[in-house]
Amino acid sequence: MHQPWASLLVHGIKRIEGRSWSAGDFHGTLFIHAAAKPPNPEDVAMVEEQYRVLYALDGVEEVSVPKAYPTSCLLGCVDVVCCLSAAEFSRVPNLSASQRAESEADHVFLCQNPRHLILPRGNMGGDHKIWHLPREETRGIDLGLVASQGAVHTDFRKLFEPREEKPQF
């Protein structure tokens, strides 16, 4: 993912990741890799303000954004509850105003339980879309992961209980 969105996701600020392509029934842990291109400072400021405005829709007055946006590295992970089309997403009940406004993409990943690496794993190449992290790259990763607080706790799984499979809307 490009910065600043990659860091915002692993720090729990970004909860819904939009894509133009479907990930099918993908769910589970998704590690987040930051692309090589450094973010433009003006773009970072604009996106950070966008999230402050989004959270204000829910009455959240302060959003603590990451202090840095590293590139070409593994940043952390999130749990993807499910992937939905825009039509399915529009019918999900009980979303907050900020969640509803967070993405207008053709497909969305509902993400929760963000964890960031204390020290991002640098000099790591990535690939487009979802790719498998080689097993040798995962050794010891869990030791460096820290739960991210985000602006508010998000539990998308509650929206779909008691179902275990992808919800049908």
Image (cartoon, helix red, strand yellow):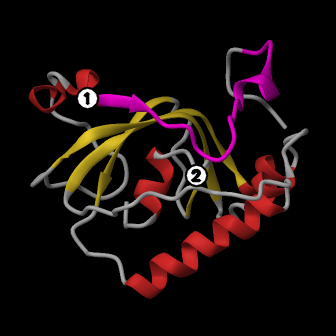
Report the number of numbered marks: 2
116 or 32, which lies in front? 116
Q: Is residue 106 magenta?
A: no
Q: Is residue 15 rendered to the left or right of residue 75? A: right
Q: Amino acid at mark 1?
A: Gly
Within the image, what quadrant is residue 93 found in? top right
What SS does tag 1 mark? helix
Relative height, residue 48 to residue 159 (above, below): below
Q: Amino acid at mark 2?
A: Ile
Contact (Cβ within 8 Å) of mark 1 with mark 2: no
Q: Is residue 44 rendered to the left or right of residue 14? A: left
Magenta segment, which residues?
145-163
Residue 67 at x, y percent in the picture: 39, 60
**Which image quarter is the C terminus in?**
top right
Q: Which SS type dominates the magenta stretch?
A: loop
42 or 111, which lies in front? 42
- The answer to which of marks 1 and 2 sits earlier in the sequence is 2
Relative height, residue 40 to residue 76 (above, below): below
Q: Residue 13's mark?
A: 2
Residue 153 at x, y percent in the picture: 68, 35
Quick one: label 2, few (<14), some, or many (20+) residues within 10 Å?
Answer: many
Residue topped by disc 1: 144
Q: Tell me which residue sits at (74%, 69%) in the image.
A: 53
Within the image, what quadrant is residue 155 found in? top right
Q: Tell me which residue sits at (22%, 27%) in the image.
A: 141
